[in-house]
Amino acid sequence: MKILMLTNTYSPHVGGVARSVAAFSGAYREMGHQVLVVAPEFANQPRNEEGVVRIAAIQNFNGSDFSAVLPVSGLLRDELDRFQPDIVHAHHPYLLGMTAVRVARYRQLPLVFTHHTLYEQYTHYVPGDSPTLQRFVIELATRFANLADQVFAPSESIAALMRKRGVHTPMAVIPTGVAVDRFASGNGGTFRQQLGIAPDAFLVGHLGRLAPEKNLSFLSECLIDFVKREDRAEVLIVGVGPLQARIRDLFEARGLGCRLHLVGNLEQGRLVDAYHAMDLFAFASRSETQGMVITEAMAAGVPVVALDANGVRDVVRDDYNGRLVASTASRADFVAALQWFRNLPGTRRQQFSEAAIATAGDFSMAVTARRALDCYRKLLDRPYDAKEAHYSQWLRIQELLKAEWEILEGLAGAAGAALNLSGVNPGGAGKPT
């Protein structure tokens, strides 16, 4: 099978979508399928990539660490003529997601959409953020899902939310799997030694993009309160993002800079060692659809304390593999959960660790990739459906979204070009650009 993946984020960008696309692409290739990934250019991207087509993009769009693609060149059409895809899989409902629609319509191929993201949580990255824009973004994703032939939801809770919002397209719950064997063995002791962390220190860790939508100000304050109460507690944070300096400043302002280890991005081997160095993983995001780092931590035997939110509650089971704290919890409530785990006897902590490993086994990459491939095969047996009614509705909501953005911000310069030039040719199924 020849699978075409289109994504607005990819390596070296750090984030759940980029990691998901890379993980599924790798698994499909290992199973004997061909994959072509279409993604924006990013600074410091890998050289001589195989199976990847890069599209010119605006770097650090609106002050973020995202890239916004510019008009797609004829290069892509030539690449697709050579590749001859069987399936088109979009990982976003905008920008390259619209390219996915054009490709699928022109070539009369099945269109798959993974609803990775609660997009309304990310509107602060575009000019003119407002409640109205957030409603349009929700409608945008819903209409796109109904335009697809198959929708993948990363978790049961997101599938339920999508159905509530009006998605009628056939839906399968297919989380991004974790390479269980890869995360099972790591050298946490050596990792601690390299950072000067004592073997008997209680190390609370976190990994991910250090961005506002991850609720990291709340998490940082909780971790500060926790280490102030626990003399032997330290914090390890892996990742980069716009809040990196802010997190460091918060700890230093409280005189706790020496208890924070902010290590940036890590290559795979060191990443696994970092997980194994942790005693507990802390997670406070409310914007997840799955929370891949949670399953990775559990594959390394690390229990999790997290806020109860979409995607998270599908993995964290309270008092089994971690603690699930109410989404409306105060800092004191979250800190209390951290302290509760810290005070457990060693044998009880080991039970939590074993439960975490067992949970990760349910999210094996091999299992989830096979489920996705089964869905692809079923689509290939169906006749092509242009979904003209849904296509017309999609065009209308896209025009409304553009109008709202223009009213609020004027949509000047590069930001306006990035959105306007990502649209569909109103004439319908013409040649993909």
Image (cartoon, rainbow, N blue to C red):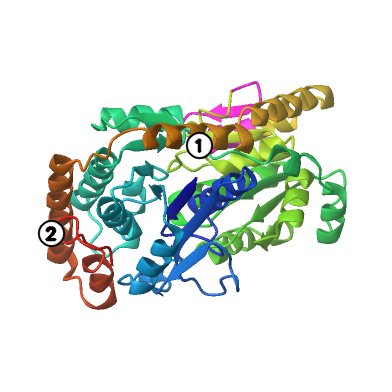
Q: Is residue 433 magenta?
A: no
Q: Which mark is residue 426?
A: 2
Q: Nearer the viewer, residue 269 or 304?
A: 269
Q: Residue 194, position in %: x, y? A: 84, 60
Residue furthest bottom as drawn: 413
- Residue 340 location, quadrant: top right
Residue 65 seen in the current view: yes
Determine whether, in the image, residue 168 is placed left or right of residue 357: left
Residue 373, numbered label: 1
Residue segment shown in magenta: 318-337
Q: Please name which of the two marks, 2 or 1, marks the residue nearer to the observer.
A: 1
Query: In the rendered view of the protein, which quadrant contains the C terminus?
Result: bottom left
Give coordinates of residue 156: x percent, y percent.
Answer: 44, 27
Near mark 1 (Cα within 10 A), the count class, few <14, some 14-19 or many ≥20, is some
Q: Position of residue 101 (x, y in %)?
A: 28, 52
The residue nearer to you, when weighing 431 against 166, is 431
Quick check: 385 above or below 22? above
Residue drawn at x 23%, y 39% is 385
Secondary structure category for the residue under label 1: helix
Looking at the image, residue 113 sits to the left or right of residue 187; the answer is left
Instruction: Report if the CB atoms under discs 2 and 1 are less than 8 Å apart.
Output: no
Question: Where does residue 426 sit, x and y in percent of width and height?
Answer: 12, 59
Q: Is residue 73 visible?
A: no
Looking at the rendered structure, the kind of residue marked 2 is Pro
Helix, strand or loop at disc 2? loop
Amino acid tagged 1 = Leu
Identify the residue shown where x is 84% and y is 58%: 196
In the image, residue 113 sits, relative to residue 395, either above or below, namely above
